[in-house]
Image (cartoon, grey):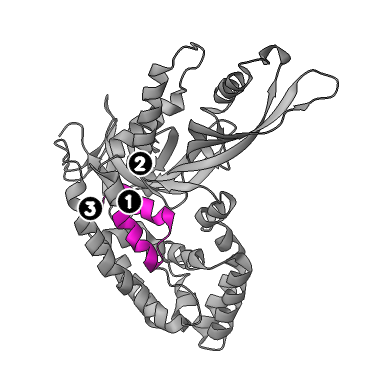
Amino acid sequence: MFFHIVLERNMQLHPRHFGRNLRDNLVSKLMKDVEGTCSGKHGFVVAITGIENVGKGLIRDGTGFVTFPVKYQCVVFRPFKGEILEAVVTMVNKMGFFAEAGPVQIFVSNHLIPDDMEFQSGDMPNYTTSDGSIKIQKDSEVRLKIIGTRVDATEIFCIGTIKDDFLGVINDPTA
Amino acid sequence: MEKNGKGFSMPKSSLKSTPSKDDSSQKSKEGRKVQFNNGGSPEERFDYSKSNGKSSSSADKGGNGSTANGKASKSKEKEPLELRLDQDRLKNAKCLMDSEAAEILQGIQDQMTLLSQDATIKLPVSFHKGLSYAQANARYTNTHSVRRVLDTLKKHGVVDGEISMIANACPETAEEVFALVPSLKVQQIDAFYIQTLQSKKSILKEPLEVALMVIKPLRKVDSTSV
C-alpha cells in the first residue's frame, strides 16, 4: 500500500557544496541517497514530494563535513500482511509463481494455489484449472493476499496466496 | 460462503469466540484480528485474560481453547498487529489509495521532465515500477469524490488503512469487502461487549453498500477487463 509520510535523515555535506546553492545541493544529495532505497520500517521510498524542514548544520569534529538534519515528505510503498494486491505474474514454475506489484516481488507457492489448478510445463508454463477455463501464466494479472513479508537490505519480498475467496486471476492476456 | 457462515457464528456468544479461534487457520487469522481493533497492547492482554477466564469457567472445549490461546497469544498479538503497530510508529503517515498515489507520482514525473537540468538526478527504477503499478490500479475517474465517500465510513470505526484497501480492491458487493478485509468483521471489545458483537458487521453493511453504489459509476471503464 502507498503511504505519504514524513521522514528524517541526517545528511552530510562536503564544504565544496557550500555557498549559494547549499540548499539545492542538499536536496539533490538527499534525492540521490534516498529515492529508490528500501527499509523494513517504511518500505520502498518511491519518491520525495517535498522538504519540510532543514535544521541547523553541525560541523563534525576533525573533518570539515557538516551534518544537516532534514525532514522530508515522501511516498513510500510498503506491503502488509493481510493486504490484498493486484500483481502481474513474471515467472511460473512447478513450485509456484512469482508476481510483481510495483517494486515488490511476491511469491505464491503451489500449496497456496487452489487444488483444482495444475502446473502445465511447456514453452509457456502455466497453472490451469481442470476444465481449462482459468489460466495463470506470465503477464496474467492476479489478485492475491499477502501472508508474509521479508525485508532484505535493499528489497522487500513477500509470500502470497490466491486460495481465499475473491482471489485469483483478473485478466488473462490471451483472452 | 463457508467462511461467511463461520463469520456469522462467531458473534453468537462471547464464550464461543475464544475456542473458535483455533478451529482452522483461516478462523485463527480472524481470531488474531480480534485483537486488531483493541486499543494498546496492555489493554489487549487484559481483555484476553478476561476472556480466558470466562472460557475456562465453561465447558472443557472452552478450557482447551484458553490454554492453547494462552501459549499462542504472544505470537498472535505481534503478527496481525503489524498494520496497527506501524500506524502507531508512523504517526503522520497517510494511507494513499492507488489512484491518489498515481496522481502524485505522475505530478512528480512531470516536474522532473521540466526541471531536468541536473543530468545526474534520475528517477530510480522503483519509481517507474511504482508509477506504472499505481496507474494500472488507479481505477477511478474522480479520486476526491471516492475519498470523500469512503471517509463517511470512518464514523463507523473503519480506519484509514482499511479504507484504502476497500478502494484499491474495487469491490462489487459488501460481502466481497468483508471477505477481503476481515478486520472489518472484528468486534470491538469495549464496555458493551456483547451488544457490539452482534451488531458491528450489520452496522457496517448498509453504509458500505451505499458507499459502493456511489463509487461504482466513478470507475474507469476498462475495455480489456474480463
Quick check: do tags 2 and 3 share a chain?
yes
- Tell me, yes or no, whether the highlighted magenta stretch contains residue B211: no
Label 1: chain? B
Q: Residue at x 44, y 48 (%)?
A: B95
Tell me which amino acid carries mark 1. Answer: Arg
Q: Where does the magenta region start and end?
A: B147-172
What crowding class fits label 1: few (fewer than 14 Cα within 10 Å), some (14-19), or many (20 or more)?
Answer: some
Work out whether mark 2 precedes mark 1 in sequence or the reverse, and give the earlier one. Answer: 2
User: Magenta residues: mostly which secondary structure?
Assistant: helix
Residue assigned mark 3 = B215
Look at the picture and state if B102 lies above or below B142. above
Q: Is residue B145 left or right of residue A82?
A: left
Percent x, y for residue B6?
Answer: 34, 71
Work out whether mark 3 precedes mark 1 in sequence or the reverse, and give the earlier one. Answer: 1
Q: Nearer the viewer, residue A83 or A169?
A: A83
Quick check: do tags 2 and 1 share a chain?
yes
| Mark 3: secondary structure | helix
Tell me which amino acid carries mark 2. Answer: Glu
Q: Nearer the viewer, residue B225 or A105?
A: B225
Does residue B18 appear in the picture of this structure? yes
**Residue contact at pointers 3 and 1, CB within 8 angstroms:** no
Percent x, y for residue A31?
Answer: 54, 24
Quadrant position of residue A26: top right
Query: What is the number of the mark on residue B147?
Result: 1
Label 3: chain? B
Residue assigned mark 2 = B100
Q: Is residue A124 left or right of residue B50?
A: left
Q: Nearer the viewer, residue B175 or A3?
A: A3
Give me the C-alpha separation between circle 3 and circle 1: 9 Å
Tell me which amino acid carries mark 3. Answer: Ile
**Residue contact at pointers 2 and 3, CB within 8 angstroms:** no
Q: Residue at x 30, y 47 (%)?
A: B144
